[in-house]
Image (cartoon, grey):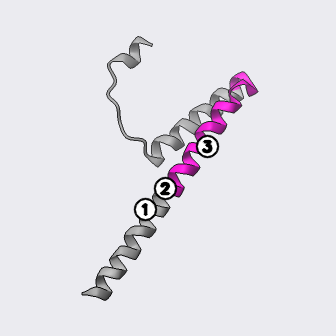
Amino acid sequence: MNEWSGRKWEPVTEERLLRAIDVLVDIAKEHGPAFDPVLETVRQELHDFRRQHSAAGQVEHEAGALLRKAG
């Protein structure tokens, strides 16, 4: 755990979630299904992340369309 103490916090990105899933898949293959709950949690985080960003993109798109109509 000492290795992690000096690391700085970085925002969650889709790329980081995908890398985490890849690592967890490798661990699950090596050590069996004990890591499946963790893997499923990270997959759900990725799904939620994509849904949030999709919704945010939709709001930005709609706001831009309204501004163009108003202008």
Residue in the image at 40% along x and 11% along y = 2
Query: CA separation, marks 3 and 2?
Result: 14 Å
Q: Residues within 10 Å of mark 2 (few under 14, many from 20)?
A: few
Which of labels 3 and 2 is toward the front? 2
Three-letter code, disc 3: Arg
Which of labels 3 and 1 is toward the front? 1
Residue 8 location (% of width, % of height) = 32, 28
Left/right placement of residue 48 relative to residue 34 reads left
Residue extending farthest to the top is: 2
Front residue (pair 65, 31): 65
Under circle 1, the secondary element is helix
Residue 7 location (% of width, % of height) = 34, 24
Range covered by the magenta-colored residues: 30-51
Residue in the image at 45% along x and 13% along y = 1
Front residue (pair 67, 31): 67
Under circle 3, the secondary element is helix
Which label number is shown at residue 56? 1
The answer to which image quadrant residue 4 occupies is top left
Q: Which residue is mark 3?
A: 43
Q: Is the C-beta separation of discs 1 and 2 under 8 Å? A: yes
Tell me, yes or no, whether the highlighted magenta stretch contains residue 36: yes
Residue in the image at 64% along x and 27% along y = 27
Three-letter code, disc 2: Gln
Prevailing secondary structure class for the magenta stretch in the rendered image: helix
Q: Which residue is mark 2?
A: 52
Q: Is the C-beta separation of discs 3 and 2 under 8 Å? A: no
Residue 68 location (% of width, % of height) = 30, 84
